[in-house]
Amino acid sequence: MKHYLGVDAGGSKTYAMITNELGEIVGKGHSGNGNHQINYDEARANIGESVRLALHQAGLDPGGIESACFGLAGADRPVDFSILRPMIGELGFAKYDIVCDTMIAMRAGTSRPYGVVLICGSGTNSAGRNRQGEDYQCGGFDYQFGDFGGGWTLAVEAFRSVIRAWDGRERPTLLTGLLLEYLGYDSVLKMFNDYLDNGKSVPVDVTKLIFQAAGQGDEVSLAILRRQGEELGKSACAVIERLNMREETFDIVLAGSVVTKGEGPYITDCIRAAVRGLAPNASLLKLRTEPVVGALWMAMEAEGTPLNRSVYERLSQVTDYHDVHS
């Protein structure tokens, strides 16, 4: 019986999972931060720990793994891979691949081994893989390097919209009342002075207020969400163009809390409108399956054979790592 390892390592957690060739989960392990850009030593230790836990539970050693795939946050540029290859290499697997965690999210969200992923959680990122196996990542490096949006940016947009309405630069917005209540102030002036005087940052959870106000027809909130959707649409189009996927039939996987949990069609409608004319056969899907499953499928596909349908159906049901028992 062949066994495969998938790893999903992000800034706050690292998940490892082992299955056999039937898609039966036989080992799991989890730990903390796995992003070397945050802390190399910590990431190295946590990735190693999660893998060792999964191997121990499965009763295997690295030699018992047919193929492994590591989806790592921070695996963005050649300089990152020059750091990550030795780190992962020391774990002792004969056959493994390292990809950015965006790619395993894409794979987890679609039945095909190719497609596009748009991530909009605390920040944004986008990537894709075509039929020929070529990858392209667009963005993921913050506002200064071309990105717009994600929870942190949207929360600030909400806050500054309230300030601009208060000082007369913009129209009134329902965000004012919602924000004051959520942050516990009885006036914008008090909020303004407290944040300015004490160097406070806007909580990322303020993003949910934009969806609330948009649901009540607030034009300021609708404009913010439209901009987010348009920016994600531009990223999708950039990936599609770069990978020559215009004529293909594929899925655009939406991942991250802003696009998977945000209420209403405000963002998705804009993405759809941006992509429709360029790639009419593309479909939008929200990510439901745990990204670590995408890493497992990529490990299985590394042998060059299509993923078994029964394996796909079994593992696509894994929507929460912590609810799965090996």
Image (spheres, helix red, strand yellow):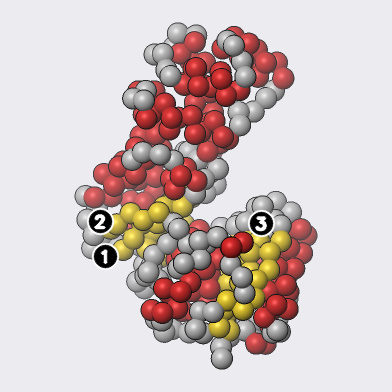
Count residues near mark 2 (Cα–Cα under 10 Å), then give few for <14, some for 14-19, many for 20+.
Answer: many
Which mark is nearer the camera, 3 or 2?
3
**Residue 145 in view of the camera:** no
Left or right of 322, for residue 137: left
Residue on which disc 3 sits: 13
Report helix, strand or loop for mark 2: loop
Q: For the residue labelled by badge 3, is the local secondary structure a helix, a strand or a loop?
A: loop
Question: Which residue corresponds to the image point at 34% horizontal and 44% vertical from the top-left?
Answer: 268
Q: Amino acid at mark 3?
A: Lys
- Residue bearing the label numbered 1: 248
Give the Cα distance between marks 1 and 3.
35 Å
Viewer-proximal residue among 207 and 142? 207
| Amino acid identity at mark 2 | Ala
Evaluate if marks 2 and 1 touch, with contact meaning CB atoms under 8 Å apart.
Answer: yes
Quadrant location of residue 183? top right
Q: Is residue 103 left or right of residue 185?
A: left
Figure quadrant of the N terminus: bottom right
Above or below, comparing residue 150 to residue 190 in the picture: below
**Marks 2/1: CA–CA distance:** 7 Å
Residue 169 at x, y percent in the picture? 44, 12
Q: Nearer the viewer, mark 1 or mark 3?
A: 3
